């Protein structure tokens, strides 16, 4: 197959550095002028790299500290870093696009308890001590619930957690004294300490104090002495087995490549754990104060910050 101008342009969108674009044009004569075909910047730009993209009309801002240019033909900005809902509304008025929108506690005070459809995550403390909240609809556009997100919502009685959720922050439902019912689209396992859910990322949350019903049935808290992670799982999420005191052994399949921050923190009874070779990413505090911490520290492939307090 012979690559044409369109194919090489699509491919070069995934380059990481201006040097890659320059080397392509220097190395292959028929692809000279590839950079000039771009009407947006596929990488963050600085004063040096900006001059190589003369025909940009839509400017993509990938990071909060990216240098921004308003010269030439630029008429619209696409913002990829996390912004509040309030910030999004201001950018929208100017014709700009925000890709990663978070509903913050300040947004909730200003715009109410209904989560806008454009929002992708709920920030830390978002509904903190919202005394009027009795139920909440979490749209399937939401992927993350920040730490202490619903803390102190003493009248919250039920909540639906869609499969789109890939992260639930610490103490998300702390002090939710009326929370007796949860619906979870992809329930995996209920232990004495945590509820596990979702694929391909296995995430969990601490069982709220007065929880009685999950998916319309009275909950049965199983012992978690041993846990076999399903082979469909590719990542163990942030704090997945955090404070699972009764966990004694766990089998991690080779399908798993990442362990989230504090994944096995404070698993004081954990004496046996296998570390498959495909695991290339270890979260900070991953094995902090777990029962096999001393043995794992002998494994030189495990980063030292896995044993630091998170």
Image: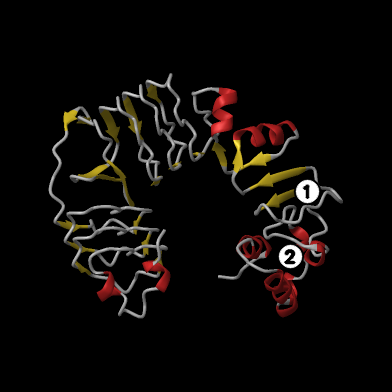
- What label does residue 236 carry, if any? none
Q: CA distance from mark 1 to mark 2?
A: 16 Å
| Drawn side of residue 222 relative to residue 215, left or right | left
Relative image position of residue 270 (x, y in whole percent): 20, 63
Give the residue at x 74% y 61%: 45
Residue 7 picture quarter: bottom right
Q: What is the quadrant of the C terminus in the image? A: bottom left
Q: Nearer the viewer, residue 234 or 193?
A: 193
Question: Looking at the image, do the residues carrying marks 1 and 2 touch, with CB atoms under 8 Å apart?
Answer: no
First of labels 1, 2 by sequence position: 2
For numbered disc 1, what is the local secondary structure? Answer: loop
| Drawn side of residue 104 relative to residue 303, left or right | right
Give the residue at x 39% y 27%: 153
Relative image position of residue 18 (x, y in whole percent): 71, 69
Relative image position of residue 158 (x, y in whole percent): 31, 25
Q: What is the quadrant of the N terminus in the image? A: bottom right
Q: Nearer the viewer, residue 77 or 221?
A: 221
Which mark's residue is nearer the viewer, 1 or 2? 1
Q: Nearer the viewer, residue 78 or 241?
A: 241
Residue 299 picture quarter: bottom left
**Dot 2: within a 10 Å radius of its alpha carbon, few (fewer than 14), some, or many (20 or more) residues?**
some
Location of residue 73 with respect to 84 vertically, above or below? below
| Drawn side of residue 18 relative to residue 260, left or right | right
Residue position for label 1: 57
Residue position for label 2: 34
Give the residue at x 35% y 36%: 174
Give the residue at x 72% y 53%: 40
Relative image position of residue 173 (x, y in whole percent): 35, 36
For numbered disc 2, what is the local secondary structure? Answer: loop
**Dot 1: within a 10 Å radius of its alpha carbon, few (fewer than 14), some, or many (20 or more) residues?**
some
| Drawn side of residue 68 relative to residue 285, left or right | right
């Amino acid at each position: 197959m012979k690559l044409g101008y369109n194919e090489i342009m699509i491919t070069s969108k995934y380059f990481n550095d201006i040097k890659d674009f320059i080397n392509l044009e220097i190395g292959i004569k028929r692809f000279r002028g590839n950079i000039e075909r771009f009407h947006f910047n596929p990488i963050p730009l600085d004063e040096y790299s900006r001059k190589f993209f003369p025909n940009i009309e839509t400017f993509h801002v990938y990071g909060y500290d990216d240098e921004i240019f308003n010269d030439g033909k630029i008429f619209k900005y696409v913002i990829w870093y996390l912004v509040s809902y309030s910030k999004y509304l201001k950018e929208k008025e100017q014709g700009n696009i925000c890709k990663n929108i978070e509903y913050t506690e300040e947004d909730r005070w200003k715009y109410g308890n209904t989560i806008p459809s454009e929002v992708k995550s709920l920030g830390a403390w978002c509904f903190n001590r919202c005394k009027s909240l009795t139920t909440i609809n979490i749209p399937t556009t939401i992927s993350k619930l920040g730490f202490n997100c619903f803390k102190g919502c003493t009248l919250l009685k039920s909540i639906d957690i869609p499969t789109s959720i890939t992260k639930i922050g610490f103490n998300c439902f702390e002090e939710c004294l009326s929370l007796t019912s949860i619906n979870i689209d992809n329930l995996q396992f209920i232990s004495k300490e945590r509820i596990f859910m979702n694929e391909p990322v296995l995430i969990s949350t601490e069982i709220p104090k007065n929880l009685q019903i999950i998916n319309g049935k009275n909950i049965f808290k199983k012992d978690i002495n041993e846990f076999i992670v399903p082979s469909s799982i590719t990542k163990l999420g942030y704090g997945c087995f955090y404070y699972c005191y009764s966990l004694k052994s766990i089998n991690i399949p080779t399908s798993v490549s990442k362990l989230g921050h504090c994944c096995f923190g404070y698993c004081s009874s954990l004496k046996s754990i296998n570390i498959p070779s495909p695991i290339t990413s270890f979260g900070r505090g991953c094995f902090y104060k777990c029962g096999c911490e001393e043995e794992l520290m002998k494994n030189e492939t495990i980063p030292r910050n896995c044993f630091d307090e998170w």
